[in-house]
Image (cartoon, rainbow, N blue to C red):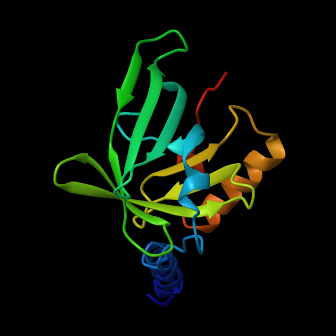
């Protein structure tokens, strides 16, 4: 019985530690200059939603409206670079004064959690995350980034509580 407790207690503690990681609030960047953030972002890697599975050449584009909302166009080719072009047009809503927490509306009235958790000082790379740590998007202003930059961004996502094995590279040309 004592041997079973010796094995069981560390296992329970490990499970609790893993489950509380997602209870830690997700840190966002201190401030996002929305004008600088607007434009095209190539999706370099992600934990794909059902819409994004088998996406090639994925690009997320943002345009700031006069009313402060953000028109978003998400495009990708399904299955290959020559596959059918798919397009989504959610609308973004800035939800805090840092401009780092957004609600992204795909279907009215639901606003999905969307948080800018990392942003390079030159606005060349970003990680968009969710409080639940269920989806993540690693994006860059260019279709290709160095292996070193890619690995650093993956390490950042893992440090935020994401499972490295769940993050998939998105094919880009």
Whether residue 85 is situated above or below residue 170 in the rendered picture: above
Whether residue 69 is situated above or below residue 131 in the rendered picture: above
Nearer to me, 71 or 158: 71
Residue 162 picture location, percent across and down: 54, 60
The residue positioned farthest toward the top in the image shown: 82
Q: Does any portion of residue 163 appear in the rendered image? A: no
Residue 138 shown left or right of residue 72 in the figure: right
Q: Residue at x 42, y 56 (%)?
A: 134
The residue positioned farthest toward the left in the image shown: 109
Residue 56 picture location, percent across and down: 53, 24
The residue positioned farthest toward the bottom in the image shown: 2
Residue 74 shown left or right of residue 116 in the figure: left
Residue 150 picture location, percent across and down: 74, 46
Residue 127 picture location, percent across and down: 59, 55
Q: Residue at x 45, y 28 (%)?
A: 75
Whether residue 6 is situated above or below residue 173 in the rendered picture: below
Whether residue 1 is situated above or below residue 96 in the rendered picture: below
- Rendered image quadrant of residue 72: top left
Q: Residue at x 48, y 79 (%)?
A: 24
Q: Does any portion of residue 47 appear in the rendered image? A: yes
């Amino acid at each position: 019985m004592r041997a079973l407790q010796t094995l069981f207690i560390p296992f329970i503690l490990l499970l609790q530690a893993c489950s509380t990681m997602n209870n830690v609030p997700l840190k966002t960047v201190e401030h996002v200059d929305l004008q600088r953030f607007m434009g095209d972002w190539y999706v370099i890697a992600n934990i794909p939603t059902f819409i994004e599975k088998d996406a090639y050449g994925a690009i997320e584009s943002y345009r700031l409206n006069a009313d402060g909302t953000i028109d978003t166009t998400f495009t990708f080719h399904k299955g290959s670079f020559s596959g059918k072009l798919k397009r989504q047009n959610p609308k973004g809503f800035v939800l805090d004064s840092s401009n780092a927490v957004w609600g992204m509306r795909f279907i009215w009235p639901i606003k999905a959690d969307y948080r800018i958790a990392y942003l390079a000082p030159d606005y060349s790379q970003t990680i968009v995350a969710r409080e639940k740590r269920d989806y993540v998007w690693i994006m860059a202003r260019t279709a290709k980034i160095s292996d070193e930059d890619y690995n650093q961004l993956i390490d950042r996502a893992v440090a935020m509580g994401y499972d490295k094995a769940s993050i998939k590279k998105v094919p880009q040309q």
